[in-house]
Image: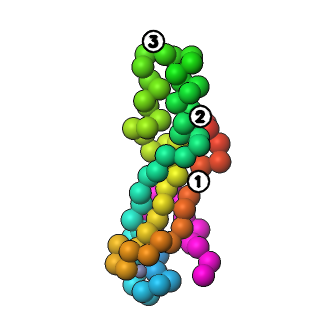
């Protein structure tokens, strides 16, 4: 089963598992980039305490898409760059 091409936001697709027209459910998870950005921000902007920023924004996280109907995993979107 090929995974769907998905982006950083929920998308309307036909689920390949249950054949329903659905909006994917997106969940955001920390990845290596999230931690890397936190370290970089922590080094350069430690006085602003903004090293927590990557953990509270969606920007540097992987986006896992699943079907809200059958709850099957549909695909993941990984941001390739930090900026
Ligand atoms: Zn489904």
Q: Which of marks 3 and 2 is nearer the N terminus?
A: 2
Question: Percent from the top left, x then y, of residue 24?
Answer: 42, 68
* Circles 2 and 1: CB atoms closer than 8 Å: no
Which element is circle 3 on? helix
Residue farthest along the bottom direction in this orientation:
19
Quarter occupied by the N terminus: bottom right
Question: Percent from the top left, x then y, of residue 4?
Answer: 57, 72
Mark 2 closeness class: few <14, some 14–19, many ≥20 residues within 10 Å: some
Majority secondary structure of magenta residues: loop
What's drawn in magenta, residue-wise? Answer: 1-12
Can the viewer see residue 74 in this picture?
yes
Towards the viewer: 9 or 54: 54
Q: Which image quarter: residue 22?
A: bottom left
In the image, which disc is placed on residue 78?
1
Towards the viewer: 4 or 30: 30
Q: Which residue is drawn at 44% across and 31% down?
A: 53
Q: Mark 2 points at which residue?
A: 36
In the image, which disc is placed on residue 52?
none
In reply to whether residue 48 is colored magenta, the answer given is no
Q: Residue at x 57, y 16 (%)?
A: 44
């Amino acid at each position: 089963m090929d995974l769907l091409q998905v982006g950083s936001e929920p998308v309307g697709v036909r689920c390949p598992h249950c054949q329903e027209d659905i909006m994917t459910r997106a969940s955001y998870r920390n990845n290596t980039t999230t931690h890397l950005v936190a370290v970089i921000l922590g080094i350069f902007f430690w006085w602003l305490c903004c090293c927590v920023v990557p953990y509270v924004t969606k920007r540097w996280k992987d986006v896992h898409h699943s079907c809200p109907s059958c709850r099957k995993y549909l695909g993941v979107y990984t941001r390739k760059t930090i900026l």
